[in-house]
Amino acid sequence: MSVLTQQYDIVRQNIPSDLCLVAVSKTKPVEMIQELYAHGVRHFGENKVQELVNKHEALPKDIQWHMIGHLQTNKVKYIAPFVSLIHSVDRLKLAKEINKEAQKTGRKIPCLIQVHIAEEQTKSGFSVQDIRSFIENRYDFADLEHIEVQGLMGMATFTNDTSQITAEFNLLKELYTAYQSVVPQLRTLSMGMSGDYPLAIQQGSNMIRVGSQIFGSR
Ligand SMILES: *Cc1c(COP(=O)(O)O)cnc(C)c1O
């Protein structure tokens, strides 16, 4: 067995079997994805539209592609026909654009609302206050008939302070649970990456996005 499949198996074997593991293949060649595909892996994550489109064209069509990076509205049309889940819906304008392009392709596109839980200003997303006001106003995105808001996504601060990371993930879990009272079909809490996924799982994550621990550093 290769180092790549071994590294994948190490992550897979150390997390609950019902937890969705998205292999983040950004910057990595299609050959590496093919190797994991042959090993049975179907969920891959990318953060750039052009790279995602190229890889989708080159690889088997039963791969479930996750868009995890910042998405410009004028590029939504390129991924709308095939993307499995967009994790990075970070503004209403983007949600509306995805809805429009989904309608054109006759799909209902699964989406996650990205929430800014980190200390750093560089990580985008709706603010915690935005989500609290969605909950208070019972806003459920139902006016956007061609997207399905399936859950929340967040990234913790890049720090060695595990108590801070835990507190940030716990906050996102609380927002997720509270928002379920407005949107009962919420079922996905995407949080945790190579450096922090054990903490995310402890706080209730059911989807993790792991790149460097599987594919090596970028
Ligand atoms: C790159 C990326 C990941 C994976 O990061 P690793 O630290 O390599 O596991 C997860 N989520 C998002 C949004 C990313 O951009």
Image: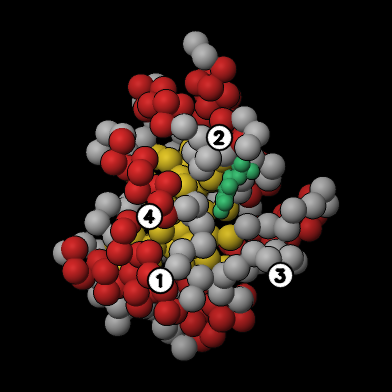
Contact between labelled residues 1 and 2, with CB atoms less than 8 Å apart = no
Q: Considering only order in the chain, which callout, 1 or 2, is on the residue closer to the N terminus?
A: 2
Contact between labelled residues 3 and 4, with CB atoms less than 8 Å apart = no
Tell me the crowding category of disc 3: few under 14, some 14 to 19, or many 20 or more residues within 10 angstroms, Cα based: few
Q: Quadrant of residue 184?
A: bottom left
Residue that carries the numbered disc 1 in the rendered image? 73
- In three-dimensional space, the C-alpha distance between marks 4 and 3, rounded to whole angstroms, equals 25 Å
Using the image as rendered, state which of residue 16 and residue 165 is in the foreground.
165
Mark nearer the viewer, 2 or 1: 1
Using the image as rendered, state which of residue 136 and residue 112 is in the foreground.
112
Tag 2: amino acid: Ile
Question: What residue do we see at 60% from left, 48% from top?
Answer: 192
Label 2 sits on a secondary structure element that is loop
Residue 200, x across and y down, in percent: 63, 49
Tell me the crowding category of disc 4: few under 14, some 14 to 19, or many 20 or more residues within 10 angstroms, Cα based: many
Residue that carries the numbered disc 4 in the rendered image? 85
Mark nearer the viewer, 4 or 3: 3
Tag 1: amino acid: Thr
Q: Considering only order in the chain, which callout, 1 or 3, is on the residue closer to the N terminus?
A: 1
Residue that carries the numbered disc 2 in the rendered image? 15
